[in-house]
Structures are given as structure tokens and as C-alpha cells.
Amino acid sequence: MISHLTILVIMVLSLGASPAAAGQTLLTLRALKQAVVAKPQDPQAHYALGLKYESLGQTRKAIVEYRKSLSLKPGNDKVLSSLGRLMAAGGEPDQAIKIIQQAVKLNPKSVEARSLLGAVYNQQAMALLQQGNLDAARQALEAGIQAKGDAAVTEALRNNLGCLYVREDKMDQAVGTWQEVIRQNPDMPQAHYNLALLYYTRGDYQAASREFFALKGIDRDMAGELSDYRFRIRTSTEVTPPVKTMITFKGSPLLTKGTVLSSDAR
């Protein structure tokens, strides 16, 4: 016998509410499971259950439900994005990119899907950069920029492209890249930090001080870290301070994630 709560779940789904809205309205896992039992061929029911599993941190079960939903209705860009997001979070960016590309192809106007694609390309590029595979890292960063996601993701990709140029000893290109990032977003601390480092190492203290004081007004902690490097750069010819890379993921803040040294410090 189907409970009244299960009937309500089915009604919400059948009336065209988004799976996310359905999952938020009906919070119990039990109710969503009952809806799947009552309508096992309903892709929306499986998606709503997957969202609930994901919210509870049960990612493997969420992936199973997303895949079931797609098996019943392959052309759903939201389900594809959700599946790709979890694949990326699980450390499978290559597979995630293929899945999210399908979502973007189905719905090219979705900024959310394009941003997610850019974020996963960024994740892939950071892994490649750490491995020393600079050509592949550049391709990933450029592909992420071409995805034309939201400003935060694109800025992070461009910042990391500047870090890649440092690894390649292409300092002028690094400077130009970070200058463009700041032109787009004057409040991005990593770009100011990175520019100041390069100016200090080149002996252009006036330009470095300009970036330092700009950074001080945005992120005092990062400015304090930069101040320490500034002293060390002036008193030692052996210091090659690391530039700051960034990793982004939809739903998470932009985080400073690791460092990249120029090639002469490796």
C-alpha cells in the first residue's frame, strides 16, 4: 500500500517541480525511497533520491541513482552535471569532463554547467601541473577558459595560467595574464600577490609596492605573507618564492591551494 507521503512525492515530481526543489520540500530519505519504489521508471524520482543521498554525503549511492535516472532519460543536462560533479569530487576529472561536456552540449546557455566544466578543467590542470606535464596543463586551462563559465571560475583559470607561465619562465606572459585578471576583478588577492612577487624578484620595487598595498586592502593575511617574502627577496639572492595557484569547484569558495615554484627553484 502506498503511503500518503509517497503520493505527495510523486505529485511534486509529476507537477514539474525540479528534483532539487522536490528534495528540499520533502526532506526524508524514506519518502524519496518510497517514491522510487512506487515509480521505478520515473527518472525524476531517481534524481531526487540521488540529490538526497548527495546531501547526506552518500556519494556512491547518489551516483547510482543519477546513473539510473540517465538510463531512463539520457538527455537531462542537470542530472549529467550532478553526476559529473561527483565524479570530479571523487578524483576522476577526465571522466567528469566527458559527462559535463554532454550537459553543456544539451544546454549551452547553462552558466552552471559551463562553470562546472571550467572548474573541473582547472582541477585536471592542477594535477597535471604538479606532475610536470606543462603542455597538457596548459591545454586544460585554455579549455576551461573557453568553457566560458562564471567570472570566479574563469579568473581562477587565468590566475593558474599565469602560474604555469612562471613554471615555463615566461615571466612577461605571466605578468600580462595577472594584469588582465586584475583588470577584470581588481579585488582578486592571488593575482595581486603573484604580480608583486614577480615585480620584487625583478627588482621593480615601485610596481611591487603598488600591488602590495592593493593586496593589503583586500586580504591582510596574504599581504603579511607577502611582506615576509619581500624582506627575504631583498636580503637573499637564493629565495624564489612560490606563486599562488587556485582551485575552484561549484558550491565551494575559491581557495588558495598549494604553490608552484619557478623552474630554477625546482
Image (cartoon, rainbow, N blue to C red):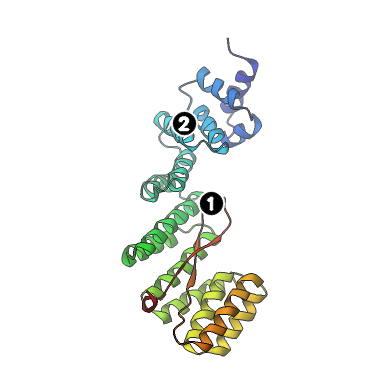
Looking at the picture, how far across and down is residue 191, in whole percent?
A: 54, 72
Disc 2 residue type?
Glu
The residue indicated by pointer 1 is: 250
Image height check: is 147 above or below 182? above
The residue indicated by pointer 2 is: 65
Give the secondary structure at mark 2. helix
Looking at the picture, how far across and down is residue 141, in whole percent?
A: 41, 63
Give the secondary structure at mark 1. loop
Q: In this view, does 82 lie to the left or right of 143?
A: right
Q: Is residue 255 left or right of residue 91?
A: right
Mark 2: give few (<14), some (14-19) or many (20+) Cα within 10 Å.
many
Looking at the picture, how far across and down is residue 203, in whole percent?
A: 50, 90
Image height check: is 45 above or below 173? above
Task: Please identify the residue farthest to the top as the structure is shown.
Answer: 1
Query: Which of the labelled discs sits on residue 20, or is there none?
Result: none
Looking at the picture, how far across and down is residue 142, in whole percent?
A: 39, 64
Q: In terms of sequence position, does the residue under pointer 1 or pointer 2 come before the other?
A: 2
Residue 219, visible in the rendered structure: no
Task: Identify the image quadrant of the C terminus.
Answer: bottom left
Disc 1 residue type?
Lys
Closest to the observer: 196 or 224? 224
Residue contact between numbered discs 1 and 2, judged by CB atoms under 8 Å: no
Residue at the image point whose x is 52% and y is 71% from the top:
181
In space, the residues marked 1 and 2 are separated at their CA atoms by: 21 Å
